[in-house]
Amino acid sequence: MNLIEINNLRKSFDTKEVLKGLDLDIETGKVYTLLGKNGAGKTTFINIMLGLIKEDGGYRTTNLNIKKDVGVVFQEDFFSKDIIVADLIKLQASFFHRKVDIDEQLKNMGLEKEKYQKTGTLSGGQKRKLSFLLATLHDPKLLILDEPTAGQDLKHYTEIMEFLKSLNERGITIIMITHDMHLMLEY
């Protein structure tokens, strides 16, 4: 069953045509890797999928509720540097009216020791793990990852890949956007 169908999707910025008739069927429970150089339109595609920008032509069909069914890990980790990790998790859970066991969530991501730290004091790898935690807190049907392993050391890279495999085993559809050939070869 297709989760999303995209037909002849087009987008230009001024005179630069970024998406030139993209056709793609995204099946439930699969992992997709969109590989391309910088400026190839990968992030533009995701922004259209999320309804952040409007396509110029073509169409997409889905039964997903973007706010409830989709989790996103952007290339940059976006959260206030002054908020405590546990408070940020509580805040995110409140958006979905979910009670979560914060200690369990932190343990699953290897962030137990960072529970009372301000997010601005976290390392790059810890911030990335926190972004994954926040994006999956509501148990999305689709997880979109924009350069999920950029800037990660081997330990964090391996942990991220193991986490993604466990999510996919639970039936979550994953779209990874990258220019890293190694990430594509993992799947």
Image (cartoon, grey):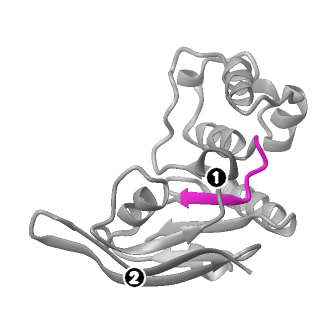
* Sequence-earlier tag: 1 or 2: 2
Which residue occupies the foreground of this view, 49 or 82? Answer: 49
What is the quadrant of residue 106 in the picture? top right
Considering the numbered disc 2 on the image, is that residue within a helix, a strand or a loop? strand
* Relative horizontal placement of residue 6, taking residue 166 as reference (left or right): left
Q: Residue at x 53, y 14 (%)?
A: 82
Tell me the kind of residue under disc 2.
Leu
Identify the mark at residue 22; answer none if there is no mark. 2
Between disc 1 and disc 2, the foreground one is: 1
Identify the mark at residue 2; answer none if there is no mark. none
Q: Is residue 118 magenta?
A: no
184 w.r.t. 178: above or below: below
Considering the numbered disc 1 on the image, is that residue within a helix, a strand or a loop? loop
Give percent across and percent down for residue 177: 50, 67
Quadrant location of the C terminus?
bottom right
Which residue occupies the foreground of this view, 38 or 89? Answer: 89
Which residue occupies the foreground of this view, 154 or 111? Answer: 111
Which residues lie in the magenta part? 138-145
Tell me the kind of residue under disc 1.
Asn
User: Which residue corresponds to mark 1?
Assistant: 65
Q: Is residue 143 magenta?
A: yes
21 w.r.t. 152: above or below: below
Q: Residue at x 74, y 22 (%)?
A: 90
* Relative horizontal placement of residue 1, taking residue 65 as reference (left or right): right
Is residue 149 visible to the viewer in this orientation of the structure? no
Give percent across and percent down for residue 80: 50, 22
Which residue occupies the foreground of this view, 169 or 38? Answer: 169
Q: Residue at x 40, y 68 (%)?
A: 42
